[in-house]
Image (cartoon, rainbow, N blue to C red):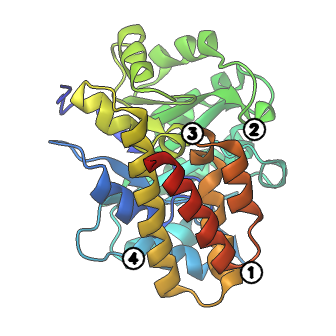
Amino acid sequence: MHTDSHFSIMSAPLQGLTETEFRQTHSRLFPLAGQPMRYFTPFLRIEKGEPRRRDIRDATASPTGSPDVTPQIICRDVSEFTLLTDALTQNGHSRINLNLGCPFPPQVRRGRGAGLLAAPDRLREIAEAMLSRPDTIFSVKMRLGIDDPAQWTGIIDIINSMPLEFVCIHPRTAAQLYRGELLLDSFAELLPALAHPVIYNGDILTPEAIDRLRTTYPDLAGVMIGRGLLSRPSIAAEWQEGTQWTEAKRRTMTLRLHDEILALYSGRLSGDTQILSKIKPFWEYPGNGFDRKAVKKIIKAGSLTNYLSAVAALSASISA
């Protein structure tokens, strides 16, 4: 059993997938002993000159038993950084993660996410703004560069000047999106250049992958799991227990996660369209662990009645 209190397990932020309903339910169904999993919200953004309200609502939702949640922000300059940070600190948040890794072209073209890696002057102003806020704990999640895996060398001094709890590295360029090989040679070069604790993120799909990373990079402060946590929600619990769950148990618990998230959406939203638009993305990753034809039928369901019927058929097939 792994109980290292100095090694953090984190849930990566994914737009439309790791909102409060997922965070609340996952933390309750797949708890970790000792040091709980840390969850990060999908990024908060500026919309029409102010922080998007629904992002603030999601980040500040705190029902009973709330997990450890850190909001992530995406910005193009110090003005947007200040608006977002002020909105979060005014709502009681003391930890904020800065997105320097979003690879989607519309964000990168506007200088947000990984786009900020090519803007050292703006990044330096943000670093200075961080230093002026000693009561807020900041962290960064970043890529190696936009289209050059050595681009980090041009801003490493700025990153090191920031007062950061940690830096999370996804060892790809933004141009790769989530495809292609991990650039581990470049990651190995970046690792000793950072003055902050390093969290690794990228293609962690099995409990064994966490062990391999700890063996290869013994100085890692932790891992942040995104798609791997959605496709295998038990991955961190299995790793901590040091046992591999049976396929039947993993599928049963994934369905339970789905059912409880759906119940929360059904209580908050109205109408089939709203509910289905929120719950269908759940199958984008966990669906890989189930019969593809059954999952396809779930995703194609046009009404909530048909959707529930398709999910029930899938559930019956794994318990038969």
Mark 4 highlights which residue?
Answer: 61
Placement of 34 over or under 301, stated as above or below: above
Placement of 279 over or under 256, stated as above or below: below
- Can the viewer see residue 202? yes
Q: Nearer the observer, disc 3 or disc 2?
A: 3
Q: Does 21 sit left or right of 176 as displayed? A: left
Residues at discs 3 and 4 in contact (Cβ within 8 Å):
no
Q: Nearer the observer, disc 4 or disc 2?
A: 4
Provide the secondary structure element on which disc 3 rests.
Answer: helix
Placement of 252 over or under 148, stated as above or below: below
Can you tell which mark lies on residue 289? 3
Q: Which amino acid does label 4 sit on?
A: Ala
Quarter holding residue 70: bottom left
Decide which of tag 4 and tag 2 comes sooner along the chain: 4
Q: Nearer the observer, disc 2 or disc 1?
A: 1
Q: What residue type is labelled 2?
A: Ala
Decide which of tag 1 and tag 4 comes sooner along the chain: 1
Provide the secondary structure element on which disc 2 rests.
Answer: helix
Q: Distance between the residues labelled 3 and 4?
A: 30 Å
Q: Distance between the residues labelled 1 and 3?
A: 40 Å
Q: Residue at x 74, y 53 (%)?
A: 296
Decide which of tag 2 and tag 1 comes sooner along the chain: 1
Q: Residue at x 62, y 54 (%)?
A: 283
Can you tell which mark lies on residue 290? none
Q: Which residue is drawn at 45% across and 14% down?
A: 192
- Check the image and name the residue furthest to the bottom: 270
Residues at discs 1 and 4 in contact (Cβ within 8 Å):
no
Can you tell which mark lies on residue 48? 1
Q: Does 2 sit left or right of 297 as displayed? A: left
Q: How far apart are marks 4 and 2 (CA)?
A: 34 Å
Q: Which residue is drawn at 39% across and 78% down?
A: 90
